[in-house]
Amino acid sequence: MEQILILVGVSTLQTLLMVFFSTLFAILIGFPLGILLNTTNQYGITPKPVFNSVLSRIIDVLRSFPFVILMIVLLPFTRMVLGTAIGTTATIIPLSIAAAPFVARITETALNEVDPGIVQAARAMGSTNWQIIHKVLVPEAMPSVVSGITLTIINLISYSAMAGTLGGGGLGDLAIRYGYQRFRTGVMTAAVIVIIIMVAAIQFAGTRLTNKMLSKR
């Protein structure tokens, strides 16, 4: 029993590290892309139809890749960057690239829902494009963005579990190598229970934060 707890504890920490850093990098990449998608569309504050169309297609292509296939495709790139394509740290790269397009679309959708009247009022007051983005669009869209990122984090937990099939570490690796392959049902059950608890906790925290932001509007 003690051995199982140690294995689950180490694997849980690995999963949390993978999800935390991949979420961080996905936001750093996807959030600016989402702003670009919104501001350069035909109704945006700086319309650039050709640029918007090209960027949109690239994001759609990345979104269409099943995660396991994307992880395999990125093995050479991951090995080039980190010197290895196996392990918890190496898994962060494909997880980040897989999640970034979702964050971009979530951000774009949230910004599209902002009342155009607010933007027009800010423009009439002499606000620059940067001021409109920074002080109007982003604050108004933030509750929806937070809600979407919550779902992205939950998806990343499931992706990190799939990464275990390719030696990515974490709870997925624990469930497969120590649970399924060694016929240790207790280990596999413990890993699944921890994943369920993590998803429930993140959803609860995300919902609370979203509601708190909405109440301050």
Image (cartoon, grey):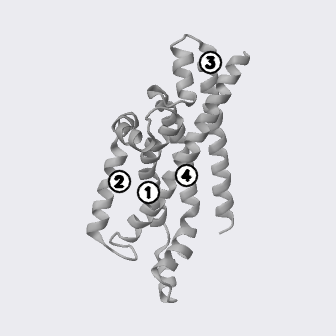
Q: Quadrant of residue 9?
A: top right
Q: Is residue 191 visible?
A: yes
| Disc nearer the start of the sequence (1/4) | 4
Q: Tell me how far mark 3 sits from mark 1, CA to CA.
A: 36 Å
Which one is in front in this view, the residue at disc 1 or the one at disc 4? Answer: 4
Q: Which mark is residue 59?
A: 2
Q: What element does badge 2 sit on?
A: helix
Reading the image, the residue beneath label 4 is 24
Above or below: residue 39 compared with residue 127: above
* Other-residue count near label 2 (Cα within 10 Å), few / some / many at <14 / 14–19 / ≥20: some
Query: As shown in the figure, which amino acid type bears the numbered disc 1?
Result: Ala
Q: Tell me how far mark 4 sits from mark 2, CA to CA.
A: 18 Å
Above or below: residue 203 compared with residue 187: below
Which one is in front in this view, the residue at disc 4 or the one at disc 3? Answer: 4
Residue 8 as seen in the image, left or right of residue 39: right
| Disc nearer the start of the sequence (2/1) | 2
Residue at the spot 44% in from the left edge and 35% down from the top edge = 84
Reading the image, the residue beneath label 1 is 104
Work out which residue is located at the far front of the displayed protein and give it: 83
Q: What element does badge 1 sit on?
A: helix
Reading the image, the residue beneath label 3 is 187
* Other-residue count near label 3 (Cα within 10 Å), few / some / many at <14 / 14–19 / ≥20: many
Above or below: residue 122 compared with residue 72: below
Q: Tell me how far mark 2 sits from mark 1, CA to CA.
A: 8 Å
| Disc nearer the start of the sequence (3/1) | 1
Q: Is residue 66 visible?
A: no
